[in-house]
Image: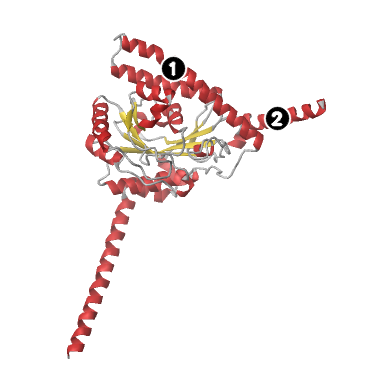
Amino acid sequence: MKNMQWKQLVIILAAALSLVAPIDGFAPSRLPKISAHLPVIKSQNSYNQNMILNSAAASSIVIPAMNSRRSLNRVQSKIVKALMVTYIASMCVALPVTLFPVYLLYKAKLIDRIQKETWSLKVGQFCSRWLMRIFPFASKRVVVNSDDEQLKNPEPSIWVCNHISMLDLFFVLALDNRIRGKNRRPLKILYWKGLEANPVTGLLCKMCGFIPVDMAANGNGNENEYDPKSFKQMLKSTKAAIEEGFDIAILPEGQPNPSPEQGLQPIYSGAFTLARMSRRPIKMMALYGLHRLWHPNVGMECVSRDMAVRVYPGGRVFKEAEEFTSTFEAVAGHFGAHGCDMPHEELNMWLDGSMWQTELSRRAATRLAAENIDQEEKSKRASEETVKKQ
């Protein structure tokens, strides 16, 4: 009996070591292999991996795809789930404790509202980042372009990202210094008001001054049903945040996507409206893999621990809403499905707008061809009628 217990213990420890040993950055076998001659700089970070791409030689760069089929075995899955649950439980304790002093300072009128929101955001980012280091349940990869001016001299922007899991908010907070750079501006995120039913996420969102959007809880994957009455207050709050110097982040899908491997859900053009209203460019990023940790419909299945964030270079001022939705669907949708960029030339065409111009030309040619066919059919019918009359 004792021998059986020892054998089980050894098996569990071996599985744990196989999972924990390759914690982000420590085991090259778990990380994408990058040829030494490629212009890629890997950050020396103890808990995740960064890829900084040099766009000057981007044509030679291939971002390694993440293996979406790689799954954890049963024991590894339980360990990852235990780490994730511990992380969430720790956040439930850490956030109220660390946000309470900020709340007291604000109530005592020692700091103003903007300071309260900015400090609360930093507290939330700190807790999320360090607790992920203590409980490393995910292997994280952030991909940015080294010559992206947004990292060095960030301009006021509207940020958009796909939505694949209930973990998205915490990963964006934890990795924000890698995503938007050290000189980043404070951020306000538009969120579903229903999150306030959870006391911890509700506390974080309210203390940070995030902007609620009221919509029906009609299930992930179904069409969003927004409350029109809440839009006026949302626009008012967003306009005030922009004037106060905050960046705005929005999830154009509106709800977690239960099947990101099939592309994005319908994209709403609210980000385009906010960008046009504020005269700000739109910056795109994309998430991959978090739904395999916490699926929107299935829950904490923990079948894989690999996730990635891709930050796309430059900001775009889109001329029309459909141009934005088509570009975001193509670019973020591809990364969300595969964990890597689409072919370099195609990606650049989407990012600089030439792909959209090609699409408009194709539509115009199709419409002209249809009109010509219609005109030929009309002429044919007219000729037939003339022959019959004769």
Q: Specify whether 354 is left or right of 65.
A: left
Measure the alpha-carbon separation of dots 1 and 2: 35 Å
| x, y percent for residue 168 | 45, 33
Please count the marks in the image: 2
Q: Nearer the viewer, mark 1 or mark 2?
A: 1
Tag 2's secondary structure? helix
Q: Specify whether 275 is left or right of 193.
A: left
To which quarter of the image does residue 118 belong? Answer: top left
Tag 1's secondary structure? helix
Which label was assigned to residue 12?
2
- Colour convention: secondary structure
Residue, x 34% and y 25% (percent of image)? 186
Looking at the image, tell me whether mark 1 or mark 2 is earlier in sequence order. Answer: 2
To which quarter of the image does residue 249 belong? Answer: top left
Extreme residue in the bottom direction = 390
Q: Is residue 314 visible?
A: no
Q: Is residue 69 visible?
A: yes
Quarter of the picture holding the N terminus:
top right
Which of these two is toward me, 330 or 259?
259
| x, y percent for residue 326 | 34, 49
Q: Mark 1–mark 2 contact, CB under 8 Å?
A: no
Residue, x 45% and y 28% (percent of image)? 170
To which quarter of the image does residue 271 belong? Answer: top left
At label 2, the amino acid type is Ile
At label 1, the amino acid type is Pro
Residue, x 32% and y 56% (percent of image)? 359
The residue that label 1 is drawn on is 96
Local crowd size for mark 1, using a 10 Å CA cut-off: few (<14), some (14–19), many (≥20): some
Which label was assigned to residue 369?
none
| x, y percent for residue 230 | 27, 33
Which of these two is toward me, 70 or 42?
70
